Amino acid sequence: MKLEGSCHCQSVKFSLQSKHLYPFNIYYCSICRRTAGSLGYAINLPGYADILEIQGKQHLSIYQTKLINEKTKEVTESHSQRNLCKVCGSRLWAWDTKW
């Protein structure tokens, strides 16, 4: 299935192929809920990163979550990269080498 999307202001547009029969999954990770500004859930659009086509790459910004170990208080950076539009602030997609 071909997935297409954009940020709110249309500065960034993207398309990719997904192997899933349904175009989205409900995702309930606390980091995604917080970065989405939601008490509920975020939407996960699973697709192939190697064929992701992006228009407006110059308008992308990447946020990486800081993780705090509760016992040691050590701060590390998440492997996940959350991509946002610099112009309107729309959350676009997250990517992680582990996925």
Image (cartoon, rainbow, N blue to C red):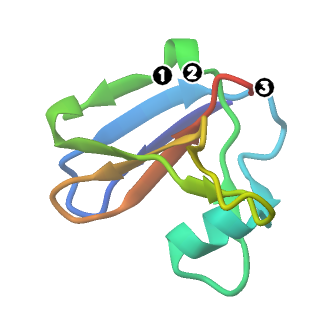
Give the labeled residue for mark 3. Answer: 19
How far apart in space, not on screen, are marks 3 and 2 (Cα)?
12 Å
Q: Secondary structure at mark 1?
A: loop
Q: Quadrant of the N terminus?
A: top right
Question: Element under label 2?
Answer: helix
Q: Earlier in the sequence, mark 3 or mark 1?
A: 3
Of 24 and 98, which appears nearest the observer? 98
Residue type pointed to by label 3: Lys
* Kind of residue at disc 2: Ala
Q: Are marks 3 and 2 in contact (CB under 8 Å)?
A: no
Q: Position of residue 90 (x, y in %)?
A: 35, 62
CA distance separating discs 3 and 1: 13 Å
Residue topped by disc 2: 49
Q: Within 10 angstroms of label 3, few (less than 14), some, or many (20 or more) residues? A: few
Residue at 64% in and 72% down: 33
Q: Position of residue 77 (x, y in %)?
A: 54, 43
Residue in the picture at 72% in, 83% down = 40
How far across and down, in percent of the image, does residue 11 sit? 18, 48
Crowd tier of the residue under label 1, counting other residues whose Cα lies within 10 Å: few below 14, some 14–19, many 20 or above: few
Please give left or right for residue 52 compared with residue 27 in the image: left
Residue appearing at x 81%, y 34% in the figure: 20
Q: CA distance from mark 2 to mark 1?
A: 5 Å
Which residue does the image show at 60% across and 35% down from the upper left? 79
Residue highlighted by disc 1: 52
Q: Amino acid at mark 1?
A: Leu
Q: Across the whole image, how many numbered discs are drawn on residues?
A: 3
